[in-house]
Amino acid sequence: MSDRHNRTKTASVGKTASAGTIKYFDYSLLFIIIFLVGFGLVMLYSVSAYEGQSVFNDPTHYLKRQVFSVGLGFIGMFVFTYFPQKWMKKITGLAYVLSLLMCLAVFAIGKSSNGSARWLKIGPIQLQPSEISKIAVILTMALLLSKVPKQIKDFKSIIKVLIPAGIMAVAIAINNLSTGIIIAGIAIIMVFVVSPKKKEFAALGVILFGLGLAGIKMGGYRVVRIAAWLHPDQYPDKAYQTLQGMYAIGSGGLFGKGLGASVQKLGYVPEAQNDFIFTIICEELGLFGAICVILLFILLIWRCMVIANSAPDLYASLIAVGVMGHIALQVVLNICVVTNWMPNTGIILPFISYGGTSVAILLSEMGLVLNVSRQIRFDAAHPIE
């Protein structure tokens, strides 16, 4: 970790915590989060109004549901921002077990959508356990790695510490390979930060690649997705969403057609409000708008990195690293999918795509990072630079 006195001017400070020290809170990160969520709601309404009107006779159908989830997410963010870390450590094991049980319950009582059972319905609430598992894995890995950082010296010890995340990833990957990959990726990033063993991680990468191939073979539809990605002209039905998304990106030009003026969202890009919302952003706001969105995510990831680098202990630092890794992976994979750099995986764009459980959990994760920022202390004798 670098010197804790080296801070950026974008950080804001609060009242004096004790003699010679100053409290810290990352208002820059909070502003970026609020801006991304606000932008996401605007784009969601623009993208989903047509389908909401044609299917539910309500152009605000998706917007209202997302606003409700955003509200829950901000409550979660507030709670986690001020939740004592000593209590967080105590409930981590319970959170992991409950999350795993919910993921397993999907096999028995899960609700299906588009041929996949990924949701649990509890009364009027429908949630996706795989999203909740991400925050459980981040907390679990942070706790484990903070206790045994010096013991992670070889491939065997790396595998041992990855077992909890591996169990969760496998349980999810059976029905949702892309989310299983993200969970495995989060855990590997956190382990790599503690012990960057190049040879061991190269070997681990080979193993995960083999497991990924096995996962593809297990689901025949995944093989078809790969084929449709490689030869979209030969699979016009399976590659339809990708092709229409590419048309949307290409027709946007430099500055786009204007907010609300998309043609592809009028039933051409299936479920455009979900994982393909970035294509409509490109069509309506153009390359300029797309770059601005990417820059916002880069700023958010950078702030998480600054907080992780300045955290008072390894546990807090790893929490920020885990959240940073989650968002970075999801943004990169989503944009690669919609631009046809990789097969369609159904990964949504954080804070912007429609998805109640996802946005609520992401905002709660941001609360974890803000919690870490609150633990940072400055020496009042040193200026903020």
Image (tube, rainbow, N blue to C red):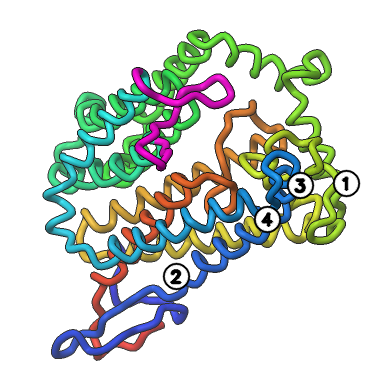
Name the secondary structure under disc 3.
helix
Q: Are marks 3 and 1 in contact (CB under 8 Å)?
A: no
Residue 170 can be seen, yes or no: no
The quadrant of the rendering that contains the N terminus is bottom left
Q: Residue at x 31, y 58 (%)?
A: 368
Residue 25 vs 118, above or below: the answer is below
Name the secondary structure under disc 4.
helix
Kind of residue at disc 1: Ser
| Residue 100 pos. (x, y %) | 27, 30
Circle 1 residue? 251
Circle 3 residue? 50
Q: Residue at x 80, y 55 (%)?
A: 284
| Residue 218 pos. (x, y %) | 48, 9
Q: Are marks 4 and 2 in contact (CB under 8 Å)?
A: no
Name the secondary structure under disc 2.
helix
Kind of residue at disc 2: Leu
Name the secondary structure under disc 1.
helix
Residue range corresponding to the magenta coloring: 108-128
Label 1 to label 2: alpha-carbon separation:
34 Å
Label 3 to label 1: alpha-carbon separation:
19 Å
Label 4 to label 3: alpha-carbon separation:
9 Å
| Residue 206 pos. (x, y %) | 43, 20
The verdict on residue 315 being magenta is no
Which-is-in-front pick, marks 3 and 2? 3
Circle 4 residue? 45
Question: Mark 1 or mark 4: which comes first in sequence?
Answer: 4
Question: Mark 4 or mark 2: which comes first in sequence?
Answer: 2
Question: Mark 1 or mark 2: which comes first in sequence?
Answer: 2
The verdict on residue 127 being magenta is yes
Kind of residue at disc 4: Tyr
